[in-house]
Amino acid sequence: MLTFNYVITDNEGIHARPAGELAKLVKGMDSKVTLVKEGKRANAAKVLAIMSLGAKYGHSIDVWVEGGDEAGNLAKLEAFMKENL
């Protein structure tokens, strides 16, 4: 399992549009991706699970990538976060 931490820089935090785009990206991966905020975990392939974290501007989230092409998928997720969140 590979992990990275990301601090939300979007003023609106993780709302419906980026959550949907993130879930779509994750569904196309061969890795299991989990988002963790303050101990609460969410399956990143599910929009409602992502939004249930309540991640707002300045909040820190951990991204766990497990199985499949972990390194490649981690790089894609890091790029997505920087561009959209």
Image (cartoon, rainbow, N blue to C red):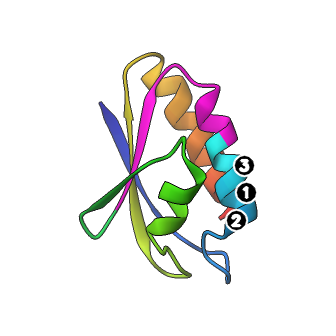
Looking at the picture, which amino acid does disc 2 mark?
A: Ala
Circle 2 or circle 3, nearest the eye = 2
Circle 2 or circle 1, nearest the eye = 2
Sequence order check: which comes first, mark 2 or mark 3?
2
Residue highlighted by disc 3? 21
Residue highlighted by disc 2? 16
Residue 28 magenta-drawn? yes
Circle 1 or circle 3, nearest the eye = 3
Residue 58 magenta-drawn? no
Q: Secondary structure at mark 2?
A: helix
Sequence order check: which comes first, mark 2 or mark 1?
2
Sequence order check: which comes first, mark 1 or mark 3?
3
Q: In the rendering, at what x and y percent does residue 8 appear?
A: 55, 71
Quadrant in the picture for residue 81: bottom right
Looking at the picture, which amino acid does disc 1 mark?
A: Glu
Magenta stretch bounds: 24-36
Q: Secondary structure at mark 1?
A: helix
Q: In the rendering, at what x and y percent does residue 1 appear?
A: 29, 30
Look at the numbered discs 2 and 1 and tell me whether their residues touch, using CB distance below 8 Å. no
* Identity of the residue drawn at 34% across and 34% down: 2
Q: In the rendering, at what x and y percent does residue 6 appear?
A: 47, 61
Residue highlighted by disc 1? 83
